[in-house]
Image (spheres, grey):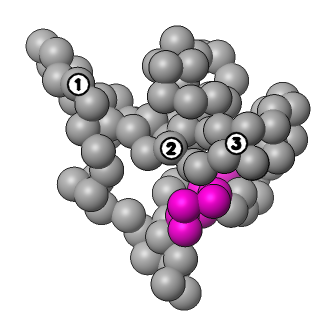
Amino acid sequence: MKIALLAASMITVATAANADIKYLESGIGITFEGCDYDKIINLKNGYAWECSEYGYTYHYGDMTVIEVNGNSKLCVGDVEEAIEEYPNGDCFDGTLYRWQ
């Protein structure tokens, strides 16, 4: 069963004028080969990402879900890399879920 993660439970890293930035790191050891519509990516921290777009990139290591003003994306790399990539780099639209 999956239940949508509430944005309030994501960790807030920064707030700036009109920008509320939150992130959730995946845990190490993710093999990522891009997104396809409805593809589920199991993250090492008990969460899962369901892709809502298509895009290819190969990455092994950390992934980060980053949310800026309510717009969430799964980005390649740790939080510093994700912030650099957001929104048009190696970042993908979708929905974050917690598996129970």
Question: Is residue 67 part of the magenta span, yes or no?
Answer: no
| Separation of residues labelled 2 and 1 (CA atoms) | 15 Å
Mark 1 residue type? Ala
| Separation of residues labelled 3 and 1 (CA atoms) | 27 Å
In front here: 35 or 58? 58
The residue lying at 82 percent from left, 46 percent from top is 31
Residue 6's spot in the image, x, y percent? 30, 61
Residue 98's spot in the image, x, y percent? 48, 70
Q: Name the residue under label 2.
A: 25
Q: Name the residue under label 3.
A: 53
Give the label, 3 or 2, closer to the camera.
Answer: 2
- Disc nearer the start of the sequence (3/2): 2
Q: What's drawn in magenta, residue-wise?
A: 43-54
Q: Is residue 72 left or right of residue 1?
A: left
- Disc nearer the start of the sequence (3/1): 1
Give the label, 3 or 1, closer to the camera.
Answer: 1
**Kind of element beneath mark 1:** strand
Question: Is residue 47 part of the magenta span, yes or no?
Answer: yes
Residue 12's spot in the image, x, y percent? 24, 38
Residue 32 higher or lower than 16, as above or below? below
Mark 3 residue type? Glu
Residue 1's disc number: none
**Kind of element beneath mark 3:** loop
Question: Where does the N terminus fall, quadrant-wise?
Answer: bottom right
Judge the density around disc 3: few (<14), some (14-19), many (≥20) Cα neighbours within 10 Å. Answer: some
Mark 2 residue type? Glu
Q: Do the residues labelled 2 and 1 touch (CB within 8 Å)?
A: no
Residue 14's disc number: 1
| Separation of residues labelled 3 and 2 (CA atoms) | 20 Å
Q: Are marks 3 and 1 in contact (CB under 8 Å)?
A: no
Residue 38 seen by the camera: no
**Kind of element beneath mark 2:** strand
